[in-house]
Amino acid sequence: MKVDEFDYYLPDELIAQHPAKVRDESSLMILKRDSGKIIDRKFKDIIEYLDEGDLLVLNNSKVIPARLYGKKIPTGTEIDLLLLNKKGEDLWEVLVRPGRRVRKGVRISFADGRLLGETLDSTGFGGRLMKFYYSGNFDEIISEAGELPLPPYIHEKLADPERYQTIYAKEQGSVAAPTAGLHFTADLLRKLKEKGVEIAYLTLHVGLGTFRPVKAENIEEHQMHSEYYELSKETAEMINSTKAEGKRVIAVGTTTTRTLESIVLKKGRIEADQGWTDIFIYSGFQFKVIDALITNFHLPRSTLLMLVSAFAGREMILNAYNHAVKKRYRFFSLGDAMFII
């Protein structure tokens, strides 16, 4: 398939620059796959579309302050660095700008000299392998000196950085939020549990694979970047039990979807697992685990748009997106949500 088959018209003013004032007051589109019917609601109304025995699977990864600003030694050239994946003890895969200034052997000073990075090698996708040296605690230094790496289409810093974290974020390691979960409040989760909806967690640390653009003309030629995941025995058992009882497994986000479907491809079934996935889901993919999907509205020509199109059908998704534009839904990471059932 051609990448331009996943394009659509989006006015710039519909790209959300700020989160909704209240998380679950964001708009929610219900999209029924059997008929293509669209229903416009608020996210808090999702409780009406969830049944006792349904299982919500959420990604509890936490965004780290992964953007660092440093100076090249000894020239003082300013360097913008983004931590991507931890590869070993004090060893990280990173993105740097300007990349031409950061070759093997280059050293960069961060945090007023408290943190020193040395480039060991280049990696695929234009990245670098960097070794860090410091005294004290690495996480504390990053917390003090780093910034949350907001997507490039968000042009202002958030007044409250916690709004770019889910309320259940726990395991540090993502460089972008699993945004479908941003709409949940503690009160909404409590009400869902009271209704008999089960809730389980997994971890996928969101990295370059989620937001790297598709540059190939044919989508089959696109190569995803690997991201680390963990699925516990408890969550695996809850998923298998839900399936056995004929109830729905509902993925909260494309990251959750990719994790679950990766494990089935690797293991043949859902079981406790951890590792790296570079799964690319597009039209023709046979979903084995998820029965419904909660997700945000994604960028044109993106792998995330291709994933939701594989789940609901390209024409149905593009029709839903056109409806969202007409109804003035808010798009992308800080925008509104859809529930594909």
Image: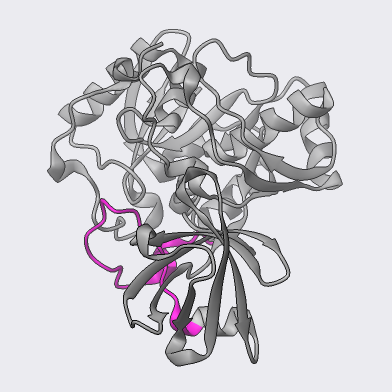
Compared across the picture, whether 295 is left or right of 200 comes to left
- Residue 243 place in picture, x, y as percent: 77, 24
- Residue 213 place in picture, x, y as percent: 38, 36
- Residue 84 place in picture, x, y as percent: 54, 57
- Tell me if I can see residue 107 in this picture: yes
The picture quadrant where one finds residue 150 is: bottom left
Q: Which quadrant holds the N terminus?
A: top left
Q: Give the vertical position of 230 relative to 322 (above or below).
A: below
Residue plotted at (43% across, 23% down)? 306
Q: Residue 34 or 232: which is nearer the viewer?
A: 232
Q: Give the tally of numbered discs.
A: 0
Residues in magenta?
Answer: 144-167
Predominant secondary structure in magenta?
Answer: loop
Report the colour scheme.
one colour
Q: Give the vertical position of 261 relative to 117 (above or below).
A: above
Residue plotted at (44% across, 76% down)? 146
Magenta span contains residue 145: yes
Magenta span contains residue 166: yes
Q: Residue 185 or 47: which is nearer the viewer?
A: 185
Q: Give the vertical position of 103 relative to 249 (above or below).
A: below
The picture quadrant where one finds residue 149 is: bottom left
The picture quadrant where one finds residue 162 is: bottom left
